Structures are given as structure tokens and as C-alpha cells.
Image (cartoon, grey):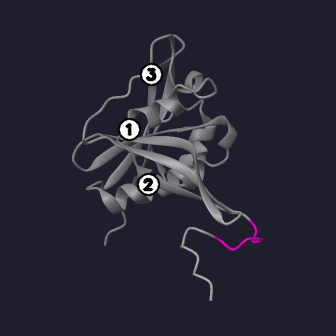
């Protein structure tokens, strides 16, 4: 009689399965691995200096990983990171960076990150301020349930020019 396989192992011959998992990380090297990637950095930071990674217990860094189940084993592959920065004791501001090889996973990663924040923190609302020109990010927020709540003209400087931003938010469902 064979031993049962551990929960993180599938039977040989089964099709590979992938899903995104979210976990909190306090390791700045994990965050830096994504934000300093040459395919990510130009989209989130201007200039030659290192991308600032503030550290404080009220900032939640979440690593997004694809868990691949294949050939009898599990492989975790880092696909991106999210940072949720406190606005006050009830609201946090989201930021996300996805590695180029995993573009297309940002919506699901953000959806899972929002759920994680509402389940594991005192967060009651998540408030985003995407620049109007970043239509892909606006669409990610909309797909995750964020609503447009306002508009802030000329409030975002990017490459020396001022741009408008939306104010978008999602609230925790009452329990």
C-alpha cells in the first residue's frame, strides 16, 4: 500500500494547474526584485536613483506568486508585488508591479490583494489615485470593483509634466 501524496503534490500524468497566491512579505529584497526589474522600473519610477521602499509596520507588502502544480510537485514563481500604504486608520492606498513575463495577471493579483487586506487588516476602504492616462490600471481597478469617486486635475507629475488623476475606491462589505 502506497503512502498518500502530500497536499502540495499531484499525481504524475495530471495536467499542470496554476493559480495565484498572495502572501505578506517583510523582505525588501523580494519587493526590490520586482520594482528594480528593467521591464518594471520605467513604469513606476523616474530618474536614476533607487526606487524608494519605505518600511513600516502599517505598510503591507504582498508578494503575488503563481503556484504551478506539475509533475508531482509545486513550484512558486514570483510574478509581482503590491504595496498598500496607509492613508489613515481605515483606508489604504494600493500600488502594484507585475513582472513583464506575467503581464495579464495584475487584475487577479489586485483582486486577491484587496480581499487579503479586508480579511487580515483593519482596512475598511482602499483608495486608488491612478493617472487618467494609465487606462490599463484604471481598468484593473474597475474590474476589481473600484468605483470612480472623484477627479483631481494636474495632481500627478510624470516626466516633468502634470497629469490628472482619478480618485477610485472600494469599501469592505459590512459583516
Query: Is 118 on the left or on the right of 46, as rendered?
Result: left
Residue 134 lies, in percent from the top left, at 59, 33
Mark 3 is surrounded, within 10 Å at the Cα level, by few (under 14), some (14 to 19) or many (20 or more) other residues, namely: some
Residue named by callout 3? 51
Label 1 to label 2: alpha-carbon separation: 20 Å
Question: Is 22 part of what is drawn in magenta?
Answer: no
Secondary structure mostly taken by the magenta-highlighted segment of the chain = loop
Among the two numbered marks 3 and 1 on one chain, the one whose residue lies closer to the N terminus:
1
Is 72 drawn above or below residue 39 in the view shown? below
Is 83 drawn above or below residue 108 in the view shown? above
The label number, if any, that marks residue 42 in the structure image = none
Determine the secondary structure under disc 3. loop
> Residue at horizontal 38%, vertical 28%?
53
Q: Which residues are magenta?
A: 10-15
Determine the secondary structure under disc 1. loop
Determine the secondary structure under disc 2. helix
In which quarter of the view is residue 80 placed? top right
Q: Quadrant of the C terminus?
A: bottom left
Residue named by callout 2? 114
Residue 101 lies, in percent from the top left, at 69, 39
Work out whether residue 140 or residue 49 is closer to the camera in this orientation and state it.
49
Look at the numbered discs 2 and 3 and tell me whether their residues touch, using CB distance below 8 Å: no
Residue 40 lies, in percent from the top left, at 59, 28
Among the two numbered marks 1 and 2 on one chain, the one whose residue lies closer to the N terminus:
1
The label number, if any, that marks residue 27 in the structure image = 1
Is 31 drawn above or below residue 9 in the view shown? above
Work out whether residue 111 or residue 68 is closer to the camera in this orientation and state it.
68
> Residue at horizontal 52%, vertical 48%?
64
Instruction: Select label 3 or label 1 by which is in front.
Output: 1
Amino acid at each position: 500500500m502506497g503512502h498518500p501524496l502530500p497536499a502540495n503534490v499531484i499525481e504524475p500524468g495530471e495536467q499542470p494547474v496554476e493559480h495565484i497566491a498572495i502572501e505578506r512579505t517583510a523582505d525588501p529584497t523580494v519587493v526590490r526584485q520586482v520594482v528594480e526589474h528593467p521591464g518594471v522600473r520605467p513604469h513606476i519610477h523616474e530618474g536614476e536613483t533607487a526606487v524608494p521602499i519605505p518600511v513600516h509596520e502599517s505598510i503591507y507588502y504582498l508578494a503575488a506568486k503563481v503556484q504551478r502544480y506539475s509533475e508531482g510537485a509545486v513550484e512558486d514563481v514570483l510574478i509581482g508585488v503590491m504595496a498598500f500604504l496607509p492613508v489613515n486608520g481605515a483606508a489604504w492606498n494600493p500600488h502594484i508591479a507585475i513582472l513583464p513575463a506575467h503581464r495579464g495577471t495584475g487584475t487577479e493579483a489586485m483582486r486577491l490583494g484587496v480581499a487579503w487586506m479586508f480579511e487580515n487588516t483593519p482596512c475598511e476602504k482602499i483608495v486608488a489615485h491612478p493617472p487618467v492616462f494609465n487606462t490599463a490600471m484604471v481598468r484593473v481597478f474597475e474590474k476589481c470593483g473600484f468605483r470612480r469617486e472623484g477627479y483631481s486635475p494636474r495632481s500627478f507629475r510624470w516626466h516633468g509634466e502634470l497629469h490628472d488623476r482619478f480618485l477610485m475606491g472600494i469599501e469592505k462589505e459590512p459583516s
